Image: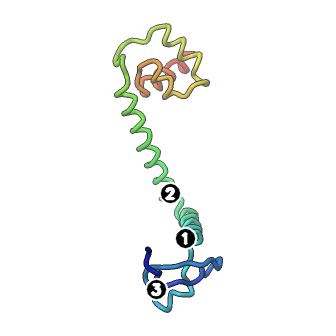
């Protein structure tokens, strides 16, 4: 059996009934919000912050992107079988056929090479032509 809530009231934004385990101070009772409204307030505040701080947001996105790229490259290095081996004509042909068809990560897995080696090979082949 669950204990009775210490406080019950209504959301100040949408009017939905809400309950709390702790009694809020009297000055907060009219401003209490349900979880959905609180989430919307936070989303709006974050969007407002982004629009006022574009440089900080840009740097944050770059940092997050770098972390993901580093993680993917580390995974591909671990899975790579032919490290340092020369590219065969068969591998180059597979790469040329699938450059715009399959994601680079998938190509690296199928060839047993790292993401970096696939990226460098694509760059060299494009500059060679």
In space, the residues marked 2 and 1 are separated at their CA atoms by 26 Å
Element assignment for label 2:
helix
Seen as rendered, the residue at the extreme right is 14
Seen as rendered, the residue at the extreme top is 89
Name the residue beneath numbered marker 3: 24
Question: Does residue 19 sit above or below 39 in this rendering?
Answer: below
Between 89 and 125, the one lying in front of the other is: 89
Element assignment for label 1:
helix
Residue 61 lies, in percent from the top left, at 49, 51
The disc, 3 or 2, on the residue closer to the chain's N-terminal end is: 3
63 horizontally vs 126: left or right: left
Question: Does residue 88 sit above or below 13 in this rendering?
Answer: above
- Name which residue lies at 53% across and 83% down: 8
Name the residue beneath numbered marker 2: 57
Element assignment for label 3:
loop
In the rendered structure, are the residues bearing label 3 and label 2 in contact, judged by CB atoms less than 8 Å apart? no
Quarter of the image that includes the C terminus: top right
CA neighbours of label 3 inside 10 A, class few (<14), some (14 to 19), many (20+): some
- Name which residue lies at 57% across and 22% down: 99
In space, the residues marked 3 and 2 are separated at their CA atoms by 34 Å
């Amino acid at each position: 059996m669950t204990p009775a809530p210490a406080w019950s009231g209504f959301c100040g934004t949408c009017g939905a009934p809400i309950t709390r385990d702790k009694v809020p101070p009297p000055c907060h009772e009219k401003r209490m919000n349900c979880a959905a409204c609180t989430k919307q307030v936070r989303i709006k505040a974050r969007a407002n912050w982004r629009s006022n701080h574009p440089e900080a947001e840009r740097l944050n996105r770059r940092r997050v992107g770098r972390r993901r790229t580093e993680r993917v490259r580390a995974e591909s290095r671990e899975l790579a079988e032919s490290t340092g081996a020369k590219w065969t004509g068969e591998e180059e042909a597979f790469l040329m056929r699938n450059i715009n068809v399959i994601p680079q990560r998938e190509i690296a897995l199928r060839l047993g090479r790292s993401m970096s080696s696939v990226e460098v090979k694509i760059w060299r082949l494009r500059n060679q032509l």
